[in-house]
Amino acid sequence: MMRWTILFGILGLSWHVKCEEGLKYDNHSLVRLIPKTEQQLTAVHQLPDAGEMEVLKRSRMVNDSFDILVPEMKKVYMEDFAKEHGMDFHVKEDNYGRSFAPVQRSGRRRSNQRLNIFGYNSFDTINAFLEQTAAAHPGLAQVQPLKRSSQGRQLKLMKISTNPGANNPIIFVDAGIHAREWAAPAMAVYLIHRLTSDPAAREEELNGVDWYILPNVNPDGYEFTRYSRGNRLWRKTRSRSSARSDCFGVDGNRNYGFKWGVSGVSRDPCNQETYAGPEPFSEPETRMVRDVMMENAKRLKLYVSLHSYGNYLVYPWGYTGASLPDDWRKLDTLAHKVSKAIVGAGGSPLKVLSAGHWYPAAGGSDDYAYGVVGVPYSYTMELTDGYEFQLPAKMLPKLLPQFYEGFKEFARNIRSEFGTVRSRDAE
Ligand SMILES: *[C@@H]1O[C@H](CO)[C@@H](O)[C@H](O)[C@H]1NC(C)=O
Ligand SMILES: *[C@@H]1O[C@H](CO)[C@@H](O)[C@H](O)[C@H]1NC(C)=O
Ligand SMILES: [Zn+2]
């Protein structure tokens, strides 16, 4: 019954939004600006972040691209803007909407599809994979059902531990709060796959460290990006707003209850990008992540929120660029080690800095974990660069194992700083 309700809900919505959403980006160009000075950086951040033009990625430092989708009629405006500020104007792609790959973009929900480790799987397929993994490794992997998303999808937390009674430090990884960032859930699925199927992981990554992984925080948004009449570039949740019944969703990464709303947010429910919600934790999805953190606060030593794109590994504070946490050097040092490990595996270096340095945005999960829950190491990881949100699946077999080396480095450090000596009982 639930299934059908959801299905008809989605179909109904899609008819409603078809005109505005389905073909929305066909005549848009992806414009890329590279600010080369701090003045230019300040200038690009003053561009409107939504409405006719949609910012896909903000520059977080000098020489870091600012990517914006521009409708045909605004191209001249953008060209003038670039000229005025002395920046190169680069059109990366015209007719952007037509570049959306038609992969698996069907409204029909097929729950029995086999999971492709190096693919972009449906939410149902990922959930089924969690259950299969737990069934195949009863002493190692366990599924904890959480609550339901706005549209009724059941979230499930994967817990992986070689010794659940040992009070090990916990690494908590979540992914997919931003719906269009498909590389993030793909990485979370790969993490689960490696941790449970690679015997070496039991000796290393899982030695004295437990892993809790929530592979898709925002399934309503995710399925909307997969649906042909949805919107491949949808970012927010899909909750209904009481303020504006024709606008949906909240930016989950602006919805956490720490310094909520103080910077980098929109108050407009119709803003497609950064609407912070009517109040902190208005979304069931962010409440579930909060609850996982709070229930495990004592043992939680590392939190990583997976996003894409840009190849960044950023740490608190996100809400401000004016100050850093007292122990920011520890956060910075570990992030550089992780980047180095990824480079060692042939990957691209991650840009390491505090999240709010050039782009303050309040209400993020990383600030909440660090500032409220007291998680000593808290990061947002922006996976990959060069393909915006449309990383071709054929690149996953190369990239995911490279990022995995970064997670091994995380685990080594968490174990050496917080690892418990194995008790007699455990042996
Ligand atoms: C895109 O532009 C073409 C040519 O100007 C036009 O025929 C078409 O209707 C436009 N598509 C949308 C979705 O606006
Ligand atoms: C940015 O790139 C330009 C070359 O394109 C270089 O001259 C400049 O030093 C770079 N600035 C920084 C801060 O990396
Ligand atoms: Zn994101």
Image (tube, rainbow, N blue to C red):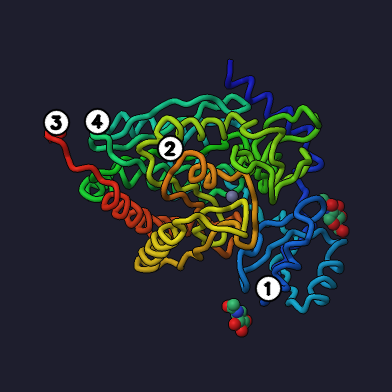
Q: Residue at x 73, y 77 (%)?
A: 88
Q: Which is more toward the observer, 16 or 326?
A: 326
| Dots 3, 4 in contact, CB < 8 A | yes
Residue lying at the far front of the rendered structure: 326
Q: Mark 4 vs mark 1: which is more N-terminal?
A: 1
Q: In which quadrant of this rendering is ligand 2 seen?
A: bottom right
Q: Position of residue 46 (x, y in %)?
A: 77, 61
Residue type for callout 3: Asp
Residue 201 drawn above or below residue 99: above
Residue 38 circle label: 1
Instruction: Name the residue beneath numbered marker 4.
Output: 165
Residue type for callout 1: Glu
Q: Quadrant of the C terminus?
A: top left
Q: Which is more toward the observer, 11 or 334?
A: 334
Residue 425 circle label: 3
Instruction: Name the residue beneath numbered marker 2.
Output: 114
- Distance between mark 4 and mark 2 Cα atoms: 33 Å
Residue 420 visible within the image: yes
Residue 200 drawn above or below residue 89: above
Relative placement, left or right, of 287 versus 98 is left
Dot 4 crowding, Cα within 10 Å, few <14, some 14–19, many 20+:
few
Q: Give the secondary structure at mark 2.
A: loop
Residue 312 circle label: none
Q: Position of residue 32 (x, y in %)?
A: 70, 68
- Distance between mark 4 and mark 1 Cα atoms: 51 Å
Q: Mark 2 vs mark 3: which is more N-terminal?
A: 2
